[in-house]
């Protein structure tokens, strides 16, 4: 599918498939990919938002109720209603500091609890140690191998995931449909505007639409020009 799409949408692009690392066939040494990682390393731009009980004076005040990303899933034990006109989403609202409140109701008893949305700071400080699965280590090793390959080349290397889609309806419908021509034009513009000494240009990821650096640096240091290019290309 991916190769057929690239031939159709970007005939100018010479490409090759890069095989992923398979740890079951070729064990991945810990000297290259760690067996564990700490959430403080990515919590600044990950979806660690949760709804907590907002019950001052109660023993369960501020204790977590449910991850924000799980409130839309069917739950036989709870119903949830968020205050306001639109429900919160990480993709569009991660940088919004306005207070978000809601009501969680137990289905069995009808008991209602006030809940508040907050970022789970324990994932930054001190951070939680997580063990990497075999698939995660294989994915990380594949990225490491690709980094090494790109570093050896004099010309820029374009890396695309195998589930990439170049043809889709854009988030702003007034811009029309996305396709290979749009991708080619925007890629060229991105390369023109990027600093000449830039190491990496992220074209997109499934995260907050306004950029990669959601949390200010603790030191108060201003973001560099390079940080500004770690953004999602719409």
Image (cartoon, rainbow, N blue to C red):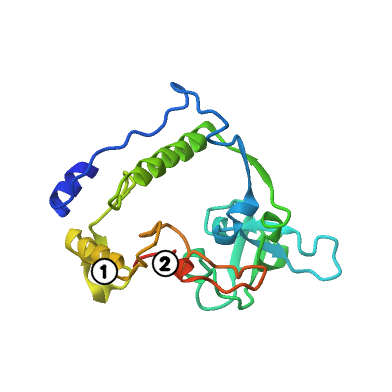
Q: Name the residue beneath numbered marker 1.
A: 189
**Does residue 186 sit above or below 136 in this rendering?**
below
Density class for disc 1 (Cα within 10 Å; few <14, some 14-19, many ≥20) is few
The percent position of residue 180, horizontal first and vertical second, equals 19, 58
Above/below status of 194 relative to 141: below
Q: How many marks?
A: 2
Q: Disc 1 and disc 2: Cα gap in Å? A: 13 Å
Q: Which mark is residue 117?
A: none
Which residue in the structure is indicated by mark 2? 229
Q: Quadrant of residue 47?
A: bottom right
Q: Residue furthest top?
A: 25
Q: Secondary structure at mark 2?
A: loop
What residue do we see at 63% from left, 50% from top?
A: 39
Seen from the viewer's position, the closer of residues 111 and 163 is 163
Q: In the rendered image of this protein, does residue 1 appear above or below residue 96?
A: above
Residue 155: where, in percent of width, then height? 27, 51
Tag 1's secondary structure?
helix
Of the two numbered discs 1 and 2 on the same chain, state the one appearing first in sequence.
Answer: 1
**Spot occupied by residue 117 in the image (x, y as percentages of width and height):** 64, 67
Determine whether, in the image, residue 89 is placed left or right of residue 182: right
**Quarter residue 98 falls in:** bottom right
Question: In the drawing, does residue 137 fall left or right of residue 168?
Answer: right
């Amino acid at each position: 599918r991916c190769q057929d799409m690239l031939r159709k949408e970007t005939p100018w692009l010479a490409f090759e498939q890069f095989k992923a690392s398979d740890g079951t066939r070729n064990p991945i040494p810990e000297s290259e990919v760690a067996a564990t990682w700490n959430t403080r390393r990515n919590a600044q731009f990950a979806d660690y938002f949760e709804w907590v009980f907002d019950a001052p004076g109660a023993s369960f005040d501020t204790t977590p109720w449910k991850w924000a990303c799980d409130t839309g899933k069917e739950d036989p034990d709870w119903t949830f209603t968020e205050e306001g006109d639109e429900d919160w989403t990480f993709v569009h609202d991660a940088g919004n500091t306005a207070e978000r409140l809601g009501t969680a109701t137990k289905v069995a008893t009808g008991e209602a609890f006030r809940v508040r949305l907050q970022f789970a700071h324990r994932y930054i400080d001190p951070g939680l140690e997580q063990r990497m699965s075999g698939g995660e280590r294989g994915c990380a090793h594949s990225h490491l191998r690709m980094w090494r390959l790109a570093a050896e080349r004099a010309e820029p290397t374009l890396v695309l995931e195998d589930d990439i889609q170049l043809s889709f309806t854009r988030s702003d419908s007034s811009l029309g449909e996305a396709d290979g021509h749009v991708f080619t034009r925007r890629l060229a513009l991105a390369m023109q505007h990027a600093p000449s000494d830039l190491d990496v240009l992220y074209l997109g990821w499934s995260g907050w639409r306004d950029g990669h650096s959601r949390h200010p640096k603790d030191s108060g240091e201003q973001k560099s020009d390079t940080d500004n290019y770690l953004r999602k290309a719409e």
